[in-house]
Amino acid sequence: MNFSKPKRIFIVDDDLMLSEALSDYLTREVPHQISLFPTGEECLKHIEEQPDVLVLDYYLNTIEKNAANGMEILKTIKQNYPKINIIMLSSQEAYSIAVKTIQKGAEQYVIKDKDAFQKITALIKDL
Amino acid sequence: MKRTILLLSVILILFAQSGFGQANPYPQIDSLKKKLSELTREDTNRAWVLVLISGKYNGINADTSLLYANEALFLSKRLKWHKGIVNALLDKGNALTSNSDYPNALDSYLEALKNCDAQKDSQRTILIYERLAHLYFIQYKFSTVLQYAQKILELNKNIGKNNKRYLRNLASGLSISGNAYMNLEKPDSARFYLLKAEKVYQELQDQYGLAEIYGNLGLINTISLGKYLRGIDYQLQSLEIYKKVNDEIGIGVNYYGIAISYAWCAYSGIPKDADPILVKKYGTNRKEMIRLAKDYIEKAIASCKKSGDLTHLPINYNALSNIQSNLLGDYKGALESFKTAVELKDSITNMETDKKLVQKNMQFEQAKKDAVSSEQLKKQKLLRNVFISGFALMILFTFIIFRQRNKMLKAKEKAERSEKFKEDFLANMSHEIRTPMNAIVGMNALVLDTELEPKQRKYLTSVQKASTNLLEIINQILDLSKIEAGKIELEKIDFSLRDVVGQVTEVLQHKTDKKEIALIVDIAADVPDIFLGDPLRLNQVLMNFTGNAIKFTEKGSVTIMVRKLSTDENKNITLAFSVVDTGIGIPKDKIRSVFESFTQVSAGDTRRYGGTGLGLTISKQLVELMGGKIEVESELGSGTTFSFALQLPIGTEESLAQRNHPAQVDGRMLDGLNILLVDDQEDNRIVCRDTLESKADVHITEATNGRKALEILKEQDFDIILMDIQMPEMDGYEATRQIRNSFPAPKREIPVLALTASVIKSDLDKCKAAGMNDYIPKPFKTTELITTIATLANRKIIYKQEEKISGKKEIPALYNNLDLSYLQEFCENDQAKMKKYINIFIQSIPILENKLKQATETKDIAEIAAQVHGFKTKLFMMSLEEAKNLGQKIEVDSRQDNPDVAAILRDTGRFLEMIHHAADMINKTKIV
């Protein structure tokens, strides 16, 4: 099996259930060091820690109406820290959004479906 | 008397031959079919081509004609196109008449009449009257025939003399009247109408019509009026025309008529009042007349043989016999002719029997009843007519059926073949399909019991589900025959309503996913979960309606809705089941026909809808069997709702638990048993052995057929024998019989459990009769096998207490029962992690509630959808399937162009209710 090294991972999603679950899922095989943030703003406060991977939800306004959306965060981070790998997470199966995020530097655009965790795990492994 | 006999037969034959002239088949069918294949749109053009094809097939192949007529009818009805409906019904009636299905033919014509405005469309109405007259004619109801003939003449006044059709209708009405009077034995009235008809046909220059009129006038003159020479004159005219148009039957009949005219003239002498012109023309000496009579009758016989008209042959031979004995004194020849006539008649009588057989085989139950009553009437009539005219009518009758003899023989063969095929099919279905299915289901279950990668488990679980479904389908088909025979029995066991509905969604989910429509389960919270009834049948019905709904829905959703309607004093609950879709809908006038067509399962419908069409038939009958009635509401473009209400008693949880958790049976209760397993199929033996050995510590000895089993049993002792039925050398029945009859006690008492692939009751009865103690249908369920063996071997049935946390359990769509097995699996049974997630869930509820309440107040549908969407992962982790489905419905509904705000708000309320309920359950169980 192709073991991946432990990585520093940020997960930005306003759904704590999802963040926790993804975190647990990712650490099942590899003891990644993972931090969870409910908003992009919170994440930006810690961005100088320079994680290897950032899993970023596209829609971050379910709870905080005024929070910046994933697209804005993506742009901000990529401008300042282009080396951070960003995986966009979204429940919208929209090709146009996916293309936009990838044009802005996202590694991949993952749909929140049953296989999302598996896909993210595989992506992180390959980074 | 003899005269009458001969007369009537000829009159009727002539009439039947041309009186209602059937359309001659043209070789245009292929080009029409080609045209049909080009007409892809379901419009009146297509309907009309279907009508045309049906018409072309009429007289060639009634079954095919009927098929096209039905399709034309179906389409015309949907298009509300009256012209198409009427013409299709006419063709249908014609085809049914050809098939001797008179009651249904009558229905078709009467329905056509209903759809046809006599004043506005008099011409078409007249056509229908003509068909009705014909239909009554061939059933000897001549007074009714006369009534229709009068109606034709009456209505024809509407047509107007300037219309081309006027004269034709007039001729037809007059000719039919004349024929009816002939058969009512009123020769003067008959002659009156026929002469009038002759004038019209002359004006029309219709040679065929004239030939018919002349033939009939000839017969009246010769036989009823004793004017032989006039008769000969008319018949020669008729003959000439028939020769021109090369109508062999017409020729033959006229030869015959001329022959008997000469014969009787020779017998009684030239009438004194005969027309001198005719006497000059035809009058001659007796000897010459006898020669001519014999000559013509021989010509008639030759003509019959030439045209293959076997039905007229006995009449002709009979006439020849009369001429030979009465006029020629050739008694030996007369006897030979008579014998030939009798032989031919016998073969026709056989055809008559064939016809009855065919009818019996072919007709539906209702039609059968009708046929019986009409048959009785027919018999009464027949009896009366036999008094009047001896066996002439019998011959006529056989003549009519003769025209369809070949078709009927084929139909009969077909019917017998299909009946035989059905029987064989059912028997084989049981054995040939269930046996390999046994291997699939059984081995798959064995693999599932081993250590597996999650993916492998997922795939194999799919195999398990699919094969279980397939088995159910097989059983369904077997069921249909049982339902049809009224022999189906409903089970009355405890079941979980939500499980039943959940199974439907589980199976059909992938279809809705593919079409990107929502599949929603909406069971009201006040609906209890456990009922007493037949879960398989309920599942079957819901599966059908839901599957159907998905088929016709391209966007939006399909919802399975269950509501409590009432509870009576005996705790019986009336539930309303609905399957609601947002599909294309069914036009109002088609709703019934959809059901009709499915119940008819005609070949046309099968082509149209695909599949067997059994689904709705079974569903409809099952619902009715369960005491409900299916209702369909539909609006074009906005969707269809199939609903039915059922009254079900409340069930108990305990017995359900036993059934629903087969893994809970402890196989160890079989420990130490010594089992003889008899089966010729290695697959089956492996499945059975491994199943038992994986669950218990048993000792199994195998035998490959009954004989070997007996040999082994002689040497060894066993606790129980598991016996296959169909085996080479010696089958299970025989082996069991020998054990019971020829083995010493206590060996002869050994329990024998039949493992049978058959589900046919007669086979199961045979098991019992052979002395087997019980049977298990293959493929067997592990629990069933274990418990049955335990029961027969006098072992106490033990249930496993623990092991619920096996991680193997599927996620059931439960709402009343909180099911955390997915979470458990996800957390790899780490209690701390589970608590973490449960806490996240519980703590998120107030936030959600707050957001939803605000959004509800401001009727912010988009926000509601966003919140519900945002909660999805939590519902998934907590296995709250029902809330998840409702959430999906809310999302879908809110995205509609004109969302139903009230419904969304109502659903949002229920959504919150479900989540609160789940939280309550968690608190009660003190997991946190």
Image: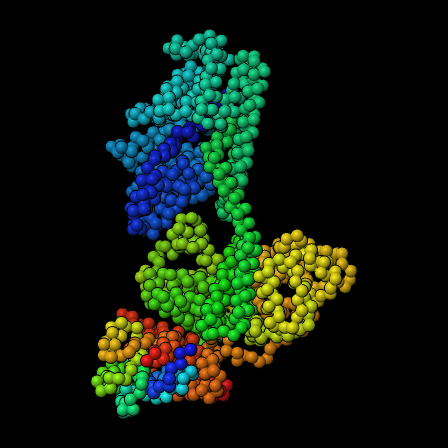
Which residue is more in the foreground, B77 or B687? B687
Asked where in the image residue B891 lies, by quadrant, the reply is bottom left
Q: Nearer the viewer, residue B89 or A8?
A: A8
Q: Residue furthest left?
A: A79
Residue B340: give x, y in percent of width and height. 55, 23
Relative to residue B674, is residue B822 depicted above or below?
Answer: below
On the question of residue B736 being in view, the answer is: no
Q: In this view of the protein, which residue sits in the foreground, B719 or B796?
A: B719
- Count how many numbered circles sit on residues in the image: 0
- Quadrant assignment, res B701: bottom right
- Please give the name of the residue rendered at 68% of the width and 72% of the height, measured from the top-left corner: B672
For the point 38% across and 66% down, the residue is: B512
Image vertical order of residue A56 relative to residue B108, above or below:
below
Residue B54 image point, x, y percent:
37, 41
Residue B337: x %, y % from top left: 55, 20
Q: Residue at x 36, y 44 (%)?
A: B88
